[in-house]
Image: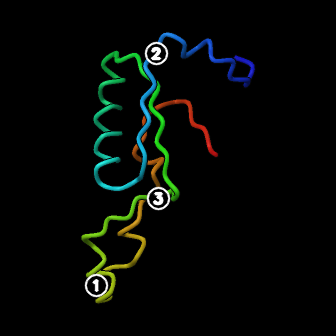
């Protein structure tokens, strides 16, 4: 591949778009990632305004200074196993 996406590589795959980066979206993305490893032929696109996942149940501990804020935030790329990434 020469770096130009001409659409031929994904023409026989189902396109799946996940909007958001919250709990539901991340669970769906991880479940689809497992299915992709088992042979599902699909192109999964996750669209989120942030490039991180905020684990909101830990915000009370952050506010009380029991944990550092970095422990409640993780980059979304950490959750994906796909080899091809695009940034928009």
Q: Which mark is residue 52?
A: 3
- Sequence-wise, the earlier of marks 1 and 3 is 3
Residue 46 location (% of width, % of height)? 46, 42
Which element is circle 2 on? loop
Q: Quadrant of residue 18?
A: top left
Rendered position, 61 above or below 70: below
Cα–Cα gap, marks 2 and 1? 46 Å
Residue 27 location (% of width, % of height)? 28, 45
Residue 37 location (% of width, % of height)? 35, 23
Tell me what residue is drawn at x 58 percent, y 14 percent: 9
Depth order, front residue of 55/71: 55
Q: Residues within 10 Å of mark 2 (few under 14, many from 20)?
A: few
- CB atoms of marks 1 and 3 within 8 Å: no
- Sequence-wise, the earlier of marks 3 and 2 is 2
Q: Quadrant of residue 10?
A: top right
Which element is circle 3 on? strand
The quadrant of the image that shows the N terminus is top right
Cα–Cα gap, marks 3 and 2? 27 Å
Q: Residue furthest bottom?
A: 64
Tell me what residue is drawn at x 63 percent, y 17 percent: 7
Q: Quadrant of residue 42?
A: top left
Tell me what residue is drawn at x 49 percent, y 52 percent: 48
Front disc: 1 or 3: 3
Front disc: 3 or 2: 2
Rendered position, 29 above or below 1: below
**Which residue lies under the disc numbered 2?**
13
Q: Which mark is residue 40?
A: none
**Which residue lies under the disc numbered 1?**
66
Cα–Cα gap, marks 1 and 3? 21 Å
- Sequence-wise, the earlier of marks 2 and 1 is 2
Which element is circle 1 on? loop
Residue 4 location (% of width, % of height)? 73, 23
């Amino acid at each position: 591949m020469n770096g130009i996406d001409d659409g031929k590589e994904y023409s026989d795959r189902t396109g799946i778009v996940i909007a958001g980066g919250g709990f539901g979206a991340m669970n769906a993305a991880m479940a689809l990632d497992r299915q992709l490893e088992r042979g599902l032929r699909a192109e999964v696109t996750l669209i989120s305004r942030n490039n991180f996942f905020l684990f909101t149940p830990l915000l009370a501990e952050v506010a009380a200074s029991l944990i550092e804020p970095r422990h409640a935030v993780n980059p979304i790329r950490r959750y994906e196993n796909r080899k091809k990434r695009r940034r928009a």
